[in-house]
Image: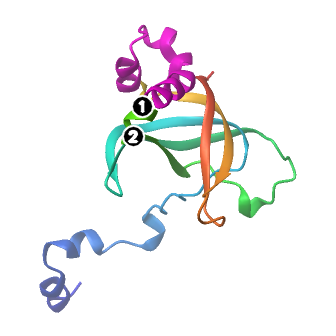
Amino acid sequence: MNQATEGKFGLLAGMLAMSLDDIPDLPSYKAPPPGVYKLLIKEIAQKDINGKVALEVKYVVVDIVELAEPETPEEDKVAPGGEFSEAFWFNDAEKVEMTLSVLKAKFGGLSELLGTNNLLEILEKAEGLQVQAIITNRTDKNDKTKVYASTRDIIPAV
């Protein structure tokens, strides 16, 4: 590395002076095709999405257990390390009870492992857990090219 490069990039020069082979690839951020997956619950947090209050759950695909369509083309599959998320909306007071029921159905299967039946405690303790879940897909009602993943039957992974 020469002095001109060091001056131009400052303190970053040392970090940037790496072979591309040594830099990890970005994870994919696409909805996995329907099936059964082993997932890591990466993060669960409140998020503001388009001015609406939501709870966002971020997942990392650990392994594909079984695809609903075994002939799924390779380019449609999500490899281990791929990420996706789900959002649960709390902006409409009339729908909060339904949102809580959905969260109960999704994460209630973790209550025994986590030693609590308090939803907040389950969500706090679920970060970092490996789980098995069924993934289904839905398309955006306004843009049919956008596909979202939805989990169900979340249980501790074996």
Residue shown at 47% from the left, 31% from the top: 99
Label 1: few (<14), some (14–19) or many (≥20) C-alpha neighbours in 10 Å: some
The answer to whether residue 156 is seen in the rendering is no
Say what secondary structure mark 1 lies in. helix
Q: Is the residue 43 above or below the residue 118 in the image? A: below
Residue shown at 59% from the left, 63% from the top: 142
Q: Which mark is residue 60?
A: none
Horizontal side, residue 27 vs residue 121: left or right: right
Q: Which residues are magenta?
A: 96-125
Residue 146 drawn at (x, y percent): 61, 62
Horizontal side, residue 32 vs residue 129: left or right: right
- Magenta span includes 119: yes
The answer to whether residue 103 is seen in the rendering is yes
Residue 158 drawn at (x, y percent): 63, 21
The residue tagged 1 is 96
Residue 112 drawn at (x, y percent): 51, 8
Q: Amino acid at mark 1?
A: Val
Q: Is the residue 129 above or below the residue 78 in the image? A: above
Which quadrant does the N terminus fall into?
bottom left
Label 2: few (<14), some (14–19) or many (≥20) C-alpha neighbours in 10 Å: few
Say what secondary structure mark 2 lies in. loop
Q: Is the residue 70 above or below the residue 105 in the image? A: below
The overriding secondary structure of the stretch rendered in magenta is: helix
Q: Label 1 to label 2, Cα distance in Å?
A: 6 Å
The residue tagged 2 is 92
Do labels 1 and 2 touch, CB within 8 Å? yes
